[in-house]
Image (cartoon, rainbow, N blue to C red):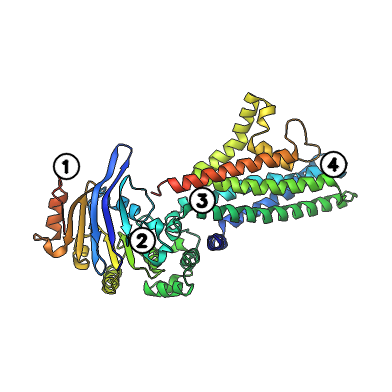
Amino acid sequence: MTDISVRGLGKTYGQVAAVTDLSFTVPAGQVTGFLGPNGAGKTTTLRILLGLVRASTGEALIGGHRYDELPRPRKIVGAVLEDTGFHPGRTGRNHLRILASAGDLPAGRVAEVLDLVDLTAAADRRVRGYSLGMRQRLGLAAALLGDPEVLILDEPANGLDPAGVAALRELLRQLAGEGRTVLVSSHVLSEVAQTVDRVVIISAGRLRFAGPLTELGDGLEKTFLHLTSDPARSPDAHSR
Amino acid sequence: MLILVKAEFLKLRTIRGPWLLLAIAPLVVVAGVSGLVISGNKTLNASVQSDALAHVGLTSIIMLLFGILAVSGEYRNRTIADTYLTDPRRGTTIAAKLVVYPAIATVSAILCSIVGVLTAAAWWAGKGSSLVWSASGMRDTIVGSIVWNIGFAALGVALGALIRNLAAAIATALAWIALVEGVVGQLLGDSLGKWLPFNAGRALGASASDASSDLLSRSAGALVLIVYVLVGAVAALVAARRRDVG
């Protein structure tokens, strides 16, 4: 079981605090929603977790290790980041072949993950011709390439059509059911409510709530708006 | 490391842009050699052979741009996050690029040298002369030019890691060559200006007639360029490890 643990995490850019004293855990075998308004610090937190941004204070660990300490990290963590890009002149299949090669993963996984995200038919087209939804599915295929124990997805439903969103929901549930750790950030609360078991809500870089979805008595949307409406108020965050 | 080197080659094999850039290099050599022959009523002797083949060295500017693409290109296309997620040892990733891009620059410079020699041979034959294959001046110019190409490809990788914005990195590189070295040379004098990177490269790829007090000797130029490459590589490795990828 590989869980995610964030302890006392802080990140400042000059005088601006993007994340302040953030602590929560994401257990294996469940889908955890990572929620917050724009600028709440979600992407910064995920980037620290993935070793792309250095924390100013605290630590963010995956299975007890920093990302850069993981041997063959694609085997352990798969990630889709909101602003991850692709070379427009490269085919989707070649993008995955490169990641498989650099990550020392079996080349045969490329065809498997293309099939899993229903992108096989377009795999040999250049990415510049892909729709936003196809790019999202290619990003998801890249995340799944190493058959990872942990999935970290930043707004993975962006650009997906309703069928794609439903397929994504089913896939995330399936992956969590296999005992994997799934952390997914999203703005679409109605979608989150249908997908996740737990939520972590942050606002202005601070934790507002972390716990099972069932503990939000007033429903996800109402509670979310209440917890994030006044970022200046003192955080009465609770974590379960 | 070997895995990352293979992945870098695969990255290059699966896109066309860098190869189109490299394809310009032999065209520059053909145009340069032909221009030299057409523009003057020179006697086509061994000394002019060296002048003609000095155009191989100028393709180092293309190799500089090629090297910049290695890292800045990844930032421009936002593939750098996936690259560092696959192997978070950023220094090793940059090191792999510092192996692959100069290696390709080596092959490119050798091909450009062959194209240059064949072009010169054709012109010489057309003018009723014959190329002196054993001319040491031509050989030294070619070898120096190849080293200049290799060094500038490595410097390009380092520059791209330090200036991650592709347009800014290219503008900085071209402005340095076109303006800064000239201005600095005028301010500090040729005795100091010849120690700058482009002038060190010029010393390496200089023809027999270009060698002058304005430039270092070929071997000194090689040493100075190696120092710039080492300093640039260390700075690139440190910057890649320390900076956030946002």
Residue B225 is situated, as x and y percent measured from the top left of the image, at: 65, 41
Q: In terms of secondary structure, where does tag 2 sit?
A: strand
Q: Amino acid at mark 1?
A: Ala
* C-alpha separation, residue under disc 4 versus residue under disc 3: 40 Å
Horizontal arrangement in the rendering, residue A172 relative to residue B72 (left or right): left
- Chain letter belonging to callout 1: A
Residue corresponding to mark 2: A80
Inter-mark Cα distance, 2 to 4: 60 Å
- SS state under label 3: helix
Are the residues under marks 1 and 2 on the same chain? yes
Q: Which residue matches tag 3?
A: B71
- Residue at x 46%, y 50% (from the top left corner): B75
Q: CA distance from mark 3 to mark 1?
A: 40 Å
For this orientation, the residue located farthest to the front is A64
Q: Secondary structure at mark 1?
A: loop
- Kindly identify the amino acid type of the residue bearing the numbered disc 3: Val
Q: Residues within 10 Å of mark 4 (few under 14, many from 20)?
A: some
Instruction: Tell me the chain of label 3.
Output: B
User: Between residues B210 and A234, which one lies in front from this camera angle?
Assistant: A234
> Do circles 2 and 4 both sit on a common chain?
no
Q: Percent from the top left, x then y, of residue A170? A: 27, 73
Q: Residues within 10 Å of mark 2 (few under 14, many from 20)?
A: many
Q: Earlier in the sequence, mark 4 or mark 3?
A: 4
Number of disc labels: 4
Label 2: chain? A
User: Do the residues indicated by labels 3 and 1 lie within the same chain of the protein?
Assistant: no
Q: Are marks 3 and 2 on the same chain?
A: no
Q: Nearer the viewer, mark 2 or mark 4?
A: 2
For the N terminus of chain A, which image quadrant? bottom left
Residue denoted by label 1: A232
Residue A47 position within the rendered picture, expressed as x and y whole percent measured from the top left: 35, 53
Residue matched to label 4: B47
